[in-house]
Image (cartoon, grey):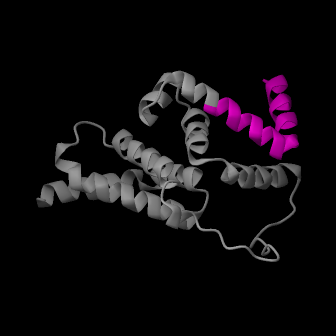
Amino acid sequence: MTEVTDGEFTAFVTERGDALLRVAYALAGSQHAAEDLLQNALAKAYARWPRIRGDAEPYVRRILYHDQVSGWRRLARRREVPVAELPERAGRRDSGHDTDLRLLLGDALRTLPPRQRAVLTLRYLEDMSLEQTAEVLGCRAGTVASQASRALARLRELVPAFDDLATRREVNR
């Protein structure tokens, strides 16, 4: 690539890298997995950089979503190591109900299948419509709606306080 193209790509990563990492973290569920996911997406985008027209961020985000959704197919990435006791979380302080709920919700989100996690990320973190989410994921709007419904139902099962919090927030609006 040329120095101009390299400079454009570097400027894009410098400007939008943190936002893309937040999305990758929401999809992957851990800092290391998010960094790997983003690095792979940026490598793919870099290879096609001269052909990307307009805003490159939607293109990179689409790579993130597709890579995360298809990642479950790669068995080697999803190996689990059973342990007798769970390790203590570093830096976890009992600072109130909302913090505990947020931690429980984060744990519950990580148990969802990748497609459901991607749908929730696009719909509620990225604030996309059903149609926009369907377009990004390459599926129908009905599929997005059903995946979101199943994911939210599962979250309500795993974290009953989540339903109470959602109800309280709707009442306060």
Residue drawn at (61%, 26%), measured in percent from left and top?
A: 145
For the stretch drawn in magenta, the main secondary structure is helix
Q: Is residue 87 left or right of residue 110?
A: right
Position in image of residue 124 (x %, y %): 61, 35
The answer, for residue 11, to whether it is visible in the render is no
Toward which corner of the image does residue 151 lie, by quadrant? top right
Does 162 appear above or below 145?
A: below
Toward which corner of the image does residue 169 lie, by quadrant? top right
Position in image of residue 166 (x %, y %): 80, 33
Toward which corner of the image does residue 125 lie, by quadrant? top right
The answer, for residue 83, to whether it is visible in the render is yes
Position in image of residue 93 (x %, y %): 83, 66
Q: Residue furthest left?
A: 2
Residue nearest the observer in this picture, 138 or 42: 138
Does 83 appear above or below 65?
A: below
Position in image of residue 10 (x %, y %): 28, 59
**Range shown magenta:** 147-173
Residue drawn at (81%, 77%), measured in percent from left and top?
A: 84
Residue nearest the observer in this picture, 49 or 74: 74
107 inside magenta stretch: no
Q: Is residue 84 left or right of residue 122?
A: right
Q: Quadrant of the C terminus?
A: top right
Residue drawn at (21%, 58%), measured in percent from left and top?
A: 7
Residue drawn at (29%, 52%), measured in percent from left and top?
A: 45
